[in-house]
Image (tube, helix red, strand yellow):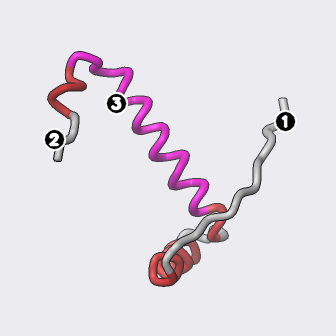
Amino acid sequence: MATEKKAFVLRIQAETLKELEQWAQEEFRSVNGQIEYLLNDALRKRKKRNSSSPSDDTAQSEPNT
């Protein structure tokens, strides 16, 4: 099964991009690869958090402002 990748435009602050470039270089990744890695990691953690304790969702939610 082949994984299809979609392209999209990302608008990002120059300073954030600069830090991402440095971080990617430290981990021997392209900036695109670093962004994809970070997004996948965040999604994996979110799925793990949501599946492990559904009764704790109200305690973990952010306060309304």
Q: Which mark is residue 49?
A: 3
Residue 18: % across, % down: 51, 82
Are there few (<14), some (14-19), or many (20+) residues within 10 Å of tag 2? few
* Secondary structure beneath label 2: loop
Q: CA distance from mark 1 to mark 3?
A: 28 Å
In front of the other: label 1 or label 2? 2
Rendered residue at 55%/46% (across/down): 40
Residue 59: % across, % down: 15, 29
**Relative to residue 65, is residue 14 drawn left or right?**
right
The answer to whether the residue labelled 1 contacts the one labelled 3, judged by CB atoms less than 8 Å apart, is no
Q: 64 or 15, which is in the foreground?
A: 64
Q: CA distance from mark 1 to mark 2?
A: 41 Å
- What residue type is disc 2 on? Pro
Residue 49 in magenta? yes
Q: Which residue is mark 1?
A: 2
Q: CA distance from mark 3 to mark 2?
A: 18 Å
Residue 32 drawn above or below residue 65: below
- What residue type is disc 1 on? Ala
Q: Earlier in the sequence, mark 1 or mark 3?
A: 1
Rendered residue at 84%/35% (across/down): 2
Tell me the magenta residue range. Answer: 34-55
Q: Which residue is mark 2?
A: 63
Residue 48 drawn above or below residue 24: above
- What residue type is disc 3 on? Arg
Q: Earlier in the sequence, mark 1 or mark 2?
A: 1
Residue extending farthest to the right is 2
Q: 52 or 11, which is in the foreground?
A: 11
